[in-house]
Image (cartoon, rainbow, N blue to C red):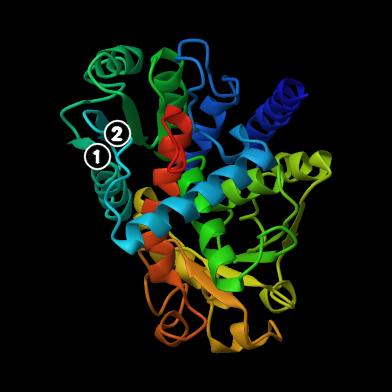
């Protein structure tokens, strides 16, 4: 049953989060992984209105539900692109957006999307002091009392889980150090648009550090048939337990390779991200030496053996480091469609989680 499947995914990913601590991670992220291990990975739903839900991990959804959200994203995007401004499911509603980590795409995509669907979004920053100035569970209950939905972009995944645990309105994960589920939903939408087919069966090769983007791709592979490969230097692999969770699902596949040329062969998608995240900038120089062989350049793209291979990057990009200017500006690159699709994918996620009327209703 769906309930049992959700429970199994929760058990597998709880084990994965706990096991992640055994692998090399930046100091801050390692602390995050340890915190995550003390929480259930399933999304709390007991306090939500009937039909509503949180979105904290890609595999909070079943494969069928991911398909439903992607199809909904395409439908709502089509309405917006056509100039039809009649679909306003969030009229009279507010979304509070909590940021402990700055962003361009996350803020603009959520704020613009919620506005286009009839609502008003509030951007909250350091004044909230989540987990510092005020307990996370207190912030959750205060904001839930004044808003119909919360979105948070945080460092600590434990804060995200606690926010959802104490909120009686849907909480959307805009990013943590552990994962980035909204980004991967936008990525899947982009792949389907560009390839003209379902993402199921696609070979997606991520080249770089085994970070939160990788974790969310692994979450997707737990519920859908994708062939996911992480090409990274030795010692920078994603959690072996997350990879085991993919294998246990019997749906997708997950492989780690240290040879980027071998990894990208036959890739439908080649994906890059910065080598040093915001809290790792002091490591940037050392990381550049380690990761330079993993730069996505014209030679690496040619090694796929397919002219139609799609290049993606979650942005912001450090051109000349993880990707060359030539690749990011090439016809194979769809990074700006991908960025725009953050809004369209998230519109669908918010509609789905809030259980408001769909366009056809």
Is 15 or 246 nearer to us in this picture? 246
- Element at badge 1? loop
Residue 317 placement, left or right of 254: left
Q: Residues within 10 Å of mark 2 (few under 14, many from 20)?
A: many
Residue situated furthest front in the rendering: 361
| Picture quadrant where residue 307 is located | bottom right
x%, y% of residue 332? Answer: 52, 82
* Residue 35 located left or right of residue 282: right
Q: Is residue 340 above or below residue 239?
A: below
Q: Which residue is mark 1?
A: 118
Residue 69 or residue 4, whichever sits in front? 69
Which residue shows up at 43% across the image and 19% down it?
Answer: 162
Residue visible at 46% across and 36% down in the picture: 361
Q: Is residue 352 above or below residue 225?
A: above
Residue closer to the observer: 166 or 317: 166
Position of 261 with respect to 30 (left or right) is right
Residue 119 position in % (x across, y down): 24, 36
Q: Assess whether mark 2 and mark 1 are in contact (beta carbons under 8 angstroms).
A: yes
Q: Quadrant of the N terminus?
A: top right
> Does residue 350 appear in the picture of this structure?
yes
Please give the residue where the numbered disc 2 appears in the rendered image: 90
Q: Earlier in the sequence, mark 1 or mark 2?
A: 2
**In the image, what residue occupies the spot 38% across and 16% down?**
167
User: Which of the pair 133/56 is nearer the observer?
Assistant: 56
Q: Secondary structure at mark 2?
A: loop
Question: In the displayed structure, would residue 191 be above or below residue 301?
Answer: above
User: Within the image, what quadrant is residue 175 found in?
Assistant: top left
Q: Could you tell me which residue is drawn at 52 percent across and 75 percent down? A: 292
């Amino acid at each position: 049953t769906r309930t049992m499947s959700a429970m199994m995914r929760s058990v597998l990913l709880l084990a994965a989060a706990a096991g992640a601590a055994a692998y090399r991670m930046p100091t801050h992220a390692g602390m995050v992984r340890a915190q995550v291990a003390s929480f259930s990975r399933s999304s709390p739903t007991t306090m939500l209105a009937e039909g509503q839900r949180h979105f904290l991990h890609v595999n909070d959804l079943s494969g069928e539900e991911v398909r439903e959200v992607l199809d909904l994203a395409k439908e709502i995007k089509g309405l917006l692109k056509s100039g039809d401004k009649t679909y306003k499911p969030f009229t009279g509603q507010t979304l509070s957006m909590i940021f402990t980590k700055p962003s361009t795409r996350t803020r603009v995509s959520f704020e613009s999307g919620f506005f286009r669907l009839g609502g008003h979004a509030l951007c909250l920053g350091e004044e909230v002091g989540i987990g510092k100035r005020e307990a996370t569970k207190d912030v959750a209950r205060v904001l839930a009392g004044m808003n119909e939905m919360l979105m948070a972009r945080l460092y600590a995944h434990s804060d995200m889980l606690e926010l959802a645990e104490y909120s009686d309105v849907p909480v959307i994960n805009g990013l943590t150090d552990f994962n980035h589920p909204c980004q991967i939903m936008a990525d899947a939408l982009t792949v389907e648009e560009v390839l003209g087919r379902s993402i199921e069966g696609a070979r997606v090769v991520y080249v770089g550090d085994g970070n939160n983007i990788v974790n969310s791709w692994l979450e997707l592979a737990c519920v859908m048939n994708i062939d996911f490969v992480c090409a990274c230097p030795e010692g920078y692999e994603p959690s072996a337990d997350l990879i085991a969770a993919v294998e246990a699902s019997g749906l997708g596949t997950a492989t780690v390779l240290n040879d980027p040329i071998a990894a990208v062969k036959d890739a439908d998608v080649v994906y890059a991200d910065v080598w040093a995240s915001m809290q790792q900038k002091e490591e940037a120089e050392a990381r550049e030496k380690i990761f330079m062989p993993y730069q996505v350049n014209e030679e690496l793209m040619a090694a796929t053996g397919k002219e139609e291979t799609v290049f993606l990057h979650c942005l912001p990009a450090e051109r000349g480091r993880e990707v060359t200017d030539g690749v990011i500006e090439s016809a194979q690159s769809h990074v700006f469609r991908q960025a725009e699709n953050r809004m369209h994918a998230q519109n669908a996620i918010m509609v789905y989680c809030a259980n408001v009327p769909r366009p056809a209703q």
